[in-house]
Amino acid sequence: MLLLGCVFIAATAFNKPINPGPGHPSQKKDIRTIIIDPGHGGFDNGTHGLFSKEKDVNLAISLKLGKAIQEAFPEIKLVFTRTTDIMPGNMPTLAAGLNYRAELANKSHGDLFICIHGNSDGHEAGHYEVRRLVGHKYVGKGKKRKRVPVYETYWVKNTRVGTGSYIWKADRAGSKGTAINQRDENSEPADSSGENMGDTTNTAIDMSSPEAMMRAQLYEKKYFANSALFATLVEEEFVKAGRHSDGVMQRDEGIRVLQATGMPSVLIETGFLTNEEEEKYLNSEAGQNEIVSNIVTALKRYKAALEGHPINTDAQPPATPPSKVTNPVN
Ligand SMILES: [Zn+2]
């Protein structure tokens, strides 16, 4: 149900142009800075496959993603939370690492926060042992004789595969609002839709004032819709590439970083490291390149939607392209 609700929001956001229309003064303010966050790092391995660690796969995909975004959009500034195998900021704990990620994103005035992760189905990678009841037998003699179950153990292949994108849970709105105000203490929030919320002065704002709280709520709604839109587009591109997709989901555990960032933010589960074939795919050049290309295509569509000219990548190019038509997104 959560999934449906979320997709609905995304679809709504996509169908209604978020852009207020031509002639609006701040129309050019779209995506200037993207934060790329390779999940885990350093002492935190994340999940394990048969032969690889999540932190390494996340980093490899993230670095490729950065390169591809830079090629597609040279004007976009990229900020990485880490580019090597460390806990971001060399922080000593997971919690400190998450705070560091969020603070860096907020300080950098990110317009989009992308977390890259790999998934686990909770079982051991590859195959795991399962016990099942196959019958009963009688043990003991006389009065002590009793019927006991007989089990056998067998190996099950770990078959769960696919992608999924997470956005924060809307009912945990408070922390997102606080982050939005903190991030923008000294500047106007990056206004991805080009709408001006009327707060053009840079005078100090009392963050607990009703005005600041209302302002945070307005941005929060917009960031939620934009996060859902981007997540939906990413999952659509994965499906087009033939991957199984669990769709867009809301989760509040383990994605505190999504709530603490004052900007649209999405956590992408790129696949299951616990599945042998998918682990190979996630570690391969071809697999990583495909994932990156899917995310970049989604980003192109997202950016175009925010700018008011959604592109439909489903459209087949005409056999003979009309000479005068230029594609604004290439
Ligand atoms: Zn992870």
Image (cartoon, grey):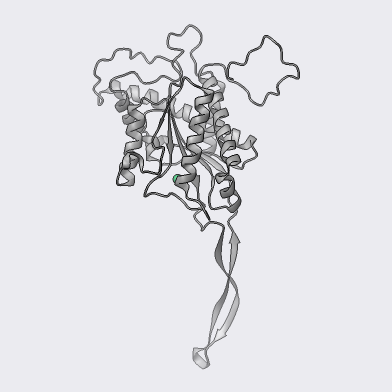
Q: Is residue 262 above or below residue 164?
A: above
Name, please, the residue furthest toward the top: 23
Residue closest to the eye, 287 or 212: 287
- Left or right: residue 55 versus residue 204 is right
Which picture quadrant has residue 186?
top left
Quadrant, the C terminus: top right
Measured as percent of width and height from the top left, residue 194 is found at 45, 15
Q: Count how many numbered circles sit on residues in the image.
A: 0
Residue at horizontal 46 percent and vertical 12 percent from the top: 27
Q: Is residue 156 visible?
A: yes
Residue beneath the point at 57% across and 35% down: 235
Give me the residue at 56% from left, 30% from top. 233
Question: Extreme bottom residue here?
Answer: 142
Q: Quadrant of residue 254?
A: top left
Left or right relative to 145: residue 94: left
Q: Position of residue 163 (x, y in %)?
A: 55, 42
- Residue 274 location (% of width, % of height): 54, 53
Residue that appears at 41% across and 40% down: 84
Residue 200 rendering spot, x and y as whole percentages: 33, 12
Tell me the quarter of the picture where residue 156 sits.
bottom right
Residue sitting at the far right: 319
Q: Front-most of 170 and 188?
A: 188
Identify whether 145 is placed above or below 159.
Answer: below
Whereabouts is ligand 1, in terms of quadrant? top left
Can residue 117 be seen?
no
